Image: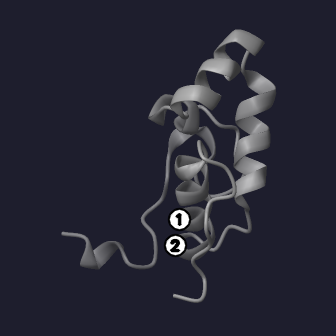
Amino acid sequence: MQEIERQTLDYSCGAAALAILLRLYFDHPVEEQDVLADIITRLPKPELADRIKHGFSMLDLKQGHHPGPCAAGRCPAGPHSSTLA
C-alpha cells in the first residue's frame, strides 16, 4: 500500500485513480497532476467550473492525451492481465 497516494483535490479522484493505474499497472510514470493538467487545459472555462463542482467524467479521463501505454485509447494487456478473467 506504499504506492497508493491520496487525491489532492475534492474533484480529482478519477485523475488520481488513473494515474495510479498507469503508474503501477502499466509502469508509465505519470502523476495525478499530469492527468489533471491535461484535462484542465482542454476544457472551456464553463465546463471546467462544472467539473470542479461535480467532478470529472469518465469521458474526460478517456479523452486525455496521456503518452504511453494507453495512447490512442488502446491499452495493452498489463502484466497482470491473465489474472483478470
User: Callout 1, which amino acid?
Assistant: Leu
Up/down of 51 relative to 38, above or below:
above
In the image, what residue occupies the spot 55% across and 34% down? 56
Q: Nearer the viewer, residue 73 or 52?
A: 52
Percent across and percent down for residue 23 are 63, 70
Number of residues whose C-alpha sits closer than 10 Å to that of mark 2, classed few (under 14), some (14–19) or many (20 or more): some
Up/down of 48 relative to 61, above or below:
above
Provide the residue designation for mark 1.
Answer: 21
Residue at the farthest bottom position: 2
Percent across and percent down for residue 36 are 72, 43
Proximity of marks 1 and 2: CB atoms separated by less than 8 Å: yes
Location of residue 30 (image quadrant): bottom right
In the image, what residue occupies the spot 49% across and 29% down? 59
Q: Is residue 52 left or right of residue 83?
A: right
Q: Nearer the viewer, residue 67 or 20?
A: 20
SS category of the residue bearing label 1: helix
Q: Is residue 22 left or right of residue 67?
A: left
User: Callout 2, which amino acid?
Assistant: Tyr
Q: Nearer the viewer, residue 9 or 42?
A: 9
Disc marking residue 40 = none
Percent across and percent down for residue 3 are 60, 83
In the image, what residue occupies the spot 25% across and 71% down? 84
Number of residues whose C-alpha sits closer than 10 Å to that of mark 1, classed few (under 14), some (14–19) or many (20 or more): some
- The residues bearing labels 1 and 2 have C-alpha atoms spaced at a distance of 5 Å
Of the 4 image quadrants, the one containing the C terminus is bottom left
Percent across and percent down for residue 2 are 59, 89
Q: How are the colours assigned in the image? A: one colour
In the image, what residue occupies the spot 65% across and 37% down? 64
SS category of the residue bearing label 2: helix
Provide the residue designation for mark 2.
Answer: 25
